[in-house]
Amino acid sequence: MKKARTSIRQVALLIESSRAYGRGLLRGIAEYAQERGNWSLRHQEMAINADPPPWLASWRGDGILVRAETPKMVRAIQNLSIPAIDLRCWRSTGTMPSFDTDPESVVRLAVDHLRNRGFTQFGFCGFGGANYSERRLWEMRKYVRSLGYDVVAYESPDPVHATTFGSEQSGMLDQKGLTRWLTSLDKPIGILACNDIRAQQLLNACHEGHIQVPDEVAVVGVDNDDVICPLCLPPLTSVEPSTSRIGYEAAAMLERMMGGEAIPAETTRIPARRIVVRSSTDAIPVDDAEFVKAYRVIRENACRGVSVQDVADAVPMSRRALERRMRTHLDQSPADMIASIRLARIKELLETTSQPLKQIAKLTGFHHDEHMAKFFKKLAGIPPGQYRNKHRVVNRNSAGD
């Protein structure tokens, strides 16, 4: 009697779990696999720059999701001649489909945040030879110049045969050069680092050079690594990629490839999800003590139902003076700033929690959920329930990234 043919897909995951980015990818892949119910996953615990595991050459599976850091890994995947998707987007360009975080979205989140903090001087700190760093620097120069400013940049020396670890090690060894660059800059300045590890090195160099963070130099990282960001001094503001969404969509594409669909060897870029604000950017580079106090009152109380008059009374200054100074320093009204903070918090709660609208309204300063819903629809364009449903599909497991 012939054995019934199984419909189980054998899928290998060559993705590191030591970093927040890799863990987020794995969560998105796992959710897709659970929904399908017919994926058997073989996960190889590995460093991002690891060689192909010994078992791979003789493995007879159906598909692979990989973070291919080295040419050797790319060749090993190609030799198998099975559907594969790269989630590193470096060595495999043009040879297999890939997914990556959209660098333009990273830059816009970081720069807009720094501008909202009042910064008008911008810098970038990256790793020489790292493709993701170079893409982000290029996008930052383009965006900042479109706003009428410029970018000062510093990249550590490009190590021979650069890998992620090699670039990061090169940055560690170049601490004195980084400190000299920071000391030479006009301040205050807001700096985007190419990732959280580079941002941590940047903060350490600030301490070595006796540079005040965030008053003289405000720092934004990328990846929102849940280990690195809180370990920084001060805790690091960071752009959070949509890693679970990338993992989920890459898994869905691999399923189509395993079903016989031909997918071009192109890169799908997914927008970054949000910026997570911590103390490394908690500054307003404005020589106006009353305005700075008003700004902090708004930041700390926007989701407690604070009014513009409440802010003016707390400083104290006249409401007209508050309006004038806010527009002078931040090019927006106090009411607009309060609304934007509340809107961002509502979106975050809708995306990352299952709390009912009544509770979300309470947490964002509304007495009734109907008022919150009306406010949200006016600014976001859709009702909160519809927004939640849409982002549950797109940002699966995003709360855990």
Image (cartoon, grey):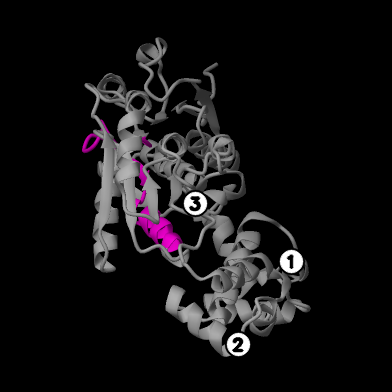
* Residue depicted at x 53% and y 75%: 380
Q: Is residue 261 visible?
A: no
Q: Which mark is residue 214?
A: 3
Q: Secondary structure at mark 3?
A: loop
Foreground tag (1 vs 2): 2
Mark-to-mark CA distance, 3 and 2: 28 Å
Give yes or no for residue 223 being in the magenta stretch: no
Mark 3: few/some/many CA within 10 Å (<14, 14-19, 20+): many
Mark-to-mark CA distance, 1 and 2: 26 Å
Could you say which is closer to the camera, residue 334 or residue 189? 189
Where residue 282 sits: x, y (%)?
Answer: 54, 56
Contact (Cβ within 8 Å) of mark 3 with mark 1? no
- Residue 86 quadrant: top left
In this rendering, the answer to whether 103 lies above or below 75 is below
* Residue depicted at x 63% and y 55%: 352
Where residue 250 sits: x, y (%)?
Answer: 42, 42
Name the side, left or right, on which 306 lies relative to 110. Answer: right
Q: How many marks?
A: 3
Mark 1: few/some/many CA within 10 Å (<14, 14-19, 20+): some
- Which residue range is magenta in the image? 86-114
Give yes or no for residue 91 being in the magenta stretch: yes
Kind of residue at badge 2: Arg
Query: Of the residues under marks 3 and 1, which one precedes in the sequence?
Result: 3
- Residue 15 quadrant: top left
* Residue depicted at x 51% and y 24%: 43
Q: Secondary structure at mark 1?
A: helix
Residue under numbered circle 1 = 363
